[in-house]
């Protein structure tokens, strides 16, 4: 009771002054002050394990020391902070290092576009260039896709609550079934049939846009063979393949790009969230050379030149100079996967189903009576930051920072299990 | 010739690795390294006067010392950098200070929404909530408006090159004539007639969105009486009035909000660019209490919690605690206006026309043979950063940082005049 | 009272079995049985003067004897009645006669398309071919335009009640002010300004569609110089000019095509209503040779081959072999115009304004308390069929059959005046 | 050779004066003059068996004697021909007889709307009222659907050539797989999954529109159980069910409405083509009482009152007073079905597949080298009118008038077989 009152007082500023649209400050009703690595602390000095990582924006953890150092030095030396798409040293260094560390070793040949600093900016730019290059207007997206909240990105997003928020009908897109969407039905055959039949009512699209693992949509991981088939469809019908790697990229699934194990080469790749290293707003769009047909300034934006983000982003690339980081992620992913399976078996009342891959996993539960929400709320009380996803919020989603150590991962999982135990009691 | 070769070498990284969409690095082909106040320096230690101010994002100049200090301290203390819409100390402080310093003294009662950190995010959120609240789909915008590059914002933007870049037709909007759009014709009567006539083909809109001074559209400043009439129209027909103050706000025209001298009270206000103080990505949407009907998370975004920006934003509010800053801007605005008039008279070959108000002014020239572009290019060579705007890039646009001193302003104007002289020769 | 009860009984079938969408059977609550020339008779043998002419579909009056003869002969001889776009004798004869009597004497060179038998079919086909030929999507229409009720035609129609009935937002069109739409404002300048300014927010359109006299919109007759200016605009910007002559064509304004006095040559002309001669469904779209780029069957429809209509249509062309018919219409138009002016002067309470030209005229009244509707209702009781039009039904509209004789016209006007007198009492 | 030259001369008028959009006059290059029952004659007195029946508009054959008599009498007596939606005797009689003969015996309770005289008019009106009643904008249609050529109807039509002809993107609709669309995949499960999943990207629709047998789409007959499941889906999610019975209705499949054997009750039914009895333009929309929420005149059209069509339509209802007609159709359907199966077996080179039900059947052939087109062309030469359908014109389609006798049917089939024989040689 006392706590509740205190909480109310603590959150008063937000309740009184901030729009009702606020969301996370409702689930986690406290004021955060400090953060380091995989931990956060709030105004009452309470410590939290982070299984959320800024919704995937903090793959390298909070306040990486090397990045901090770079930022402080740069600011102290009056480095130019805001530069639109003017040339600056941090921008130049990022471009060079990104090519050296990421593109060249993977034999990838993309032009880098700075479309504005958020995920939805990169998606909007990807849709624009795909439509321009192909001179077609339709884009195919998938059930339970999430690509962003501005009208272009929202039109390829599946969630009806978000779509409804547009206040207008969303056009020029067709929603097709994601991998394993309908039990015992082959979504590839369905897609092919619509494309090959001139009477299907679905026009030849400019592009197919997909997430290899749908984060907001419920941690749905497409099979590698499905991704390969989608790429084949794109090649067969001359459709551009856009991979939105905003959440699943930057190592989240174990490789820098989430699609690497599938052996596919997208025409356009959207990156944001962790590309900025330390959690500062940044996004890039990778475009195959032959499709980089933009006119100068045809897409622009004031915050395309966030130099602090470029500095941290360049520093973050250090993690990718060798295989070590990737291997470590995959080991932790196995640990997480096994823990999830154990929990599911131990608590059959959950009706749990394991989801995802890499450090992007979850447990889908039978969500009567908001079970998943209750587990996350209990976990918060016990010092674990974890949230739900999925069309009905039915998935407890685990996105720890990739730099978490085994001890941290185990401690987080212990709190999770205690929370489940408590809620099911 | 030697310079040209050197320049080429210098910009090689951008030319080879960055998308053809890049724009400012073409106009100003150098690499910037440092910036302070109203000055920038490039890799060759050349100094530039800034009459551009990050397209309006640097009203308080580069690297304000107090803001720098706050950022460095915060980073050094592992302050939480990325927080979505979780509660944090910098967010709380910003909300409180914004209310104290900006809203309360102006007797304004808005809820603050963090819609994502860019101008287009705030515009998209404004359009969404206006449509939701009114249950109407049309939004009226004005000729030569610029509101952003994502599909929702682009649909209320006038520029045909930008609109065409969408690759799809843009809907749910109607473009009406801005103030003094057609010579000797009353744009208010035109708008009223369309609204009052049930046979006009224009549906009752959810909202009217406008900039009080159109920046990208050519520094077109609406008259105060026109703004007042638009507000009256909104009240008469129960239409929401959205003021996009992304470029003209935060003191650019002399008052914190650009519409203050008109005595109007918008239903929704869009702020970005200089709201972040030091040039870090940040945006807010101000919504009248009664229209704050969002569901939690109905609009969201990963980078709504850029705490470094909140720190600088809070510090920037210090400028608004008294009238001094505002008065100083208006004095410099007079100086700038007189200088412009003098130039126009002195160089009749320009066919010049003075545009704008506050420190958002320009000279529209008769733009045969890209005269305006040549002037800006020459100014760059001579150490002045200044760009064009308008549908045909016919306006030389002056947006110095508001903190510029008289000496800086005069020096910039001197370079400008030399450049004009050189080009007209 | 007795009458009311009888009326109710009479209309019972319609009230019980027909949709609430029914309209004219509400204004004129009787059952019509016979019609000849400019007269109708109802089930009670009451005679009515026709100032409505099937909303312009009966320019040649009811049951023209020569047409009747042709139909009866054809049916009796098992002539093919329904033929889609197969070759038939009546189709062949119509095509030949239309060329001989209408096109050749006017030095016009159009291909004839049979787009389906209604006005909205011809408009939809015109919009389609204009968009195909120009590869642009926007069409400019005018305030208070009426072009039909299917989604394509409705999107260029002004009336908000009709538009709202679509149940979806209507796109790809821009509504511009018709001639003399806003007092003392030049609508041509507005339109030009929007077209010449690349920042106007209005894309270069595929076509401009217009009625020279807006029938449903309130009998608004464009001035000839305005039409000529619109044609010039079309030529200057390479926009197709579509004249929807469905209601104003076929002699309604005194010449076969309503635009003849303006000296313009549209790129596409829409004809329906009276083109079928005796009131049978028929429509044609005239397309300049160079724009006839249809693929076979790209637009089609089951009832494109209404051979009974072709027979009557061919017979109707006889009226146009000499100038006599045209001259006679213009004489009657003068008589009508003078009568209207007299009425307006005699009854200042009407606040009347004369509208229209040819035998397409009306009186706009100050429509407090549904004055216009009351006049028409009273006229019906007294044996005159006349209806209202305009966005607020404020215009009493006169569309007598063109073949009406002076006596008929005068008798109708007498009833009208009696009705006005009665209502104003 | 001589024939070819003669043909050219014969069709000259159409080639020179008619738009390139003409289609049937290309497949059947002659001029038809007379027609009776299931036969046509051309200008050279050549006789043709009709397996086309005006694309389904002549179910009762050409020039039914009783209908002819009624038309001639009515015209001779100056019966009112054109009446919009005014009350007339033929309209009243049609409404009463339609209720007595069709609705009441089937225990159906619909209001009758006259939406304009063509198929696309009834479809557009159905879409409008469904959207109005539900306040939703999306309509679900099916692959290979054909509903008409105006923008509203075209948006629910599958054919890409027709859709492309719109010149604009078509919105507010979602195309779902028709029955047995993808081999071994359950289209009902797909549809249900999209509806039950709030993240599917498909909004709850206003209506589902379908043809029970897709005519233009390739004579695809849905199974009765599939129709029943679709009805269940509509009830479960409160979606309106629209059956477009324009081609399959009026007895074409053996019962008056094509859906009767499925035991379903649509919310809205679209009828046109043969509803007019003798091939005159007419259409009606049947709307369940509770959904008849139109405002007066909210949808209208000039040719809603085609009294000659009403006369023939009323006469045609006589066929439905007893079961005889229905039984006879079904007997002929069996004969046709057996003949088709025999042909398929006898000519394995066709790779033939039997399609359809009732007197709406076809043979889908392996259509390399336009085999189906060649068969129809050869049949025409030999005196049989038969056309193709399907997305690749791969189906030879049989739509004889329902009144054809066994001798006529057999003679037509004999010509068909000879043509196949000739083409395959």
Image (tube, coloured by chain):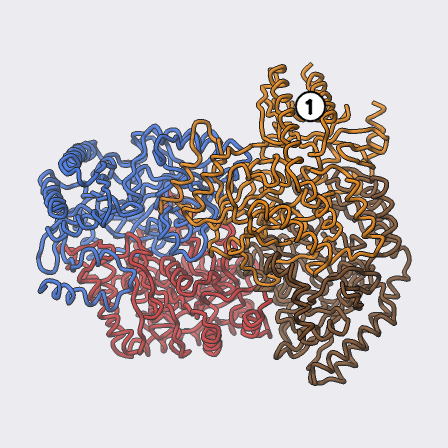
Chain colours: A blue, B red, C brown, D orange
Q: How many marks?
A: 1
Q: What quarter of the picture does the N terminus of chain A occupy?
A: bottom left
Q: Residues within 10 Å of mark 1 (few under 14, many from 20)?
A: many
Query: From what the image shows, is residue D186 above or below residue B37?
Result: above
Q: Which quarter of the picture shows residue C409?
A: bottom right
Q: In this rendering, does residue D340 appear at all?
A: yes
Place of residue A178 in the rendered image (x, y in percent of width and height, measured from the top left): 37, 37
Place of residue C123 in the rendered image (x, y in percent of width and height, measured from the top left): 67, 53
Left or right, residue D238 beside residue A419: right
Along the viewing direction, whichever of B57 and B177 lies nearer the viewer:
B177
Place of residue A222 in the rendered image (x, y in percent of width and height, measured from the top left): 32, 34
Q: Residue at x 45, y 70 (%)?
A: B239
Left or right, residue A243 beside residue D371: left
Residue matched to label 1 = D375
Q: Which quarter of the picture shows residue C119?
A: bottom right
Along the viewing direction, whichever of D274 and C402 lies nearer the viewer:
D274
Place of residue B284 in the rendered image (x, y in percent of width and height, measured from the top left): 31, 63
Q: In this rendering, does residue C286 appear at all?
A: no
Query: From what the image shows, is residue C283 above or below residue C405?
Result: above
Left or right, residue A387 beside residue D75: left
Left or right, residue C26 beside residue D45: left
Secondary element at tag 1: helix
Query: From what the image shows, is residue D85 above or below residue C342?
Result: above
The subunit letter for the residue under badge 1 reads D
Along the viewing direction, whichever of A256 and D145 lies nearer the viewer:
D145
């Amino acid at each position: 009771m006392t706590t509740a009152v205190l909480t109310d007082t603590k959150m008063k500023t937000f309740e009184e002054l901030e729009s009702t649209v606020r969301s996370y400050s409702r689930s986690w009703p406290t004021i955060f002050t400090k953060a380091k690595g995989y931990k956060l602390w709030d105004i009452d000095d309470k410590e939290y394990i982070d299984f959320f990582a800024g919704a995937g924006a903090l793959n390298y953890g909070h306040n990486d020391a090397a990045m901090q150092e770079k930022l402080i030095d740069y600011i102290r030396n009056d480095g130019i902070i805001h530069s639109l798409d003017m040339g600056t040293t941090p921008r130049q260094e990022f471009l060079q290092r990104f090519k050296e560390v990421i593109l060249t070793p993977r034999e990838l040949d993309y032009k880098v576009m700075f479309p504005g600093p958020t995920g939805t900016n990169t998606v909007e730019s990807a849709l624009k260039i795909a439509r321009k290059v192909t001179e077609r207007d339709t884009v195919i997206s998938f059930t339970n896709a999430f690509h962003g909240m501005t009208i272009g990105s929202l039109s390829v997003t599946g969630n009806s609550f978000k779509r409804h928020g547009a206040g207008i009908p969303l056009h020029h897109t067709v929603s097709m079934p994601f991998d394993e969407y309908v039990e015992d039905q082959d979504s590839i055959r369905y897609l092919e049939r619509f494309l090959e039949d001139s009477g299907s009512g679905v026009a030849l699209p400019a592009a197919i846009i997909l997430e290899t693992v749908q984060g907001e949509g419920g941690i749905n991981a497409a099979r590698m063979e499905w991704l390969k088939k989608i790429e084949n469809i794109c090649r067969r019908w001359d459709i551009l393949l856009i991979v939105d790697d905003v959440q699943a990229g930057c190592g989240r699934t174990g490789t820098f790009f989430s699609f690497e194990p599938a052996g596919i080469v997208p025409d356009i790749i959207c990156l944001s969230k962790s590309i900025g290293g330390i959690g500062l707003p940044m996004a890039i769009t990778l475009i195959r050379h032959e499709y980089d047909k933009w006119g100068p300034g045809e897409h622009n934006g004031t915050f395309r030149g966030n130099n602090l983000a470029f500095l941290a982003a360049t520093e973050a690339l250090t993690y990718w100079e060798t295989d070590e980081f990737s291997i470590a992620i995959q080991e932790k992913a196995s640990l997480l996967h096994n823990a999830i399976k154990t929990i599911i078996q131990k608590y059959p009342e959950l009706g749990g189903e394991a989801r995802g891959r890499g450090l992007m996993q979850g447990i889908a539960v039978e969500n009567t009576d908001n079970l998943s929400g209750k587990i996350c709320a209990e976990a918060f009380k016990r010092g674990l930051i974890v949230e739900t996803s999925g069309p009905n919020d039915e998935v407890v989603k685990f996105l720890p920072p990739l730099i978490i150590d085994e001890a941290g991962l185990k401690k987080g999982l212990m709190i999770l299990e205690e929370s489940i135990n408590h809620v099911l009691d």
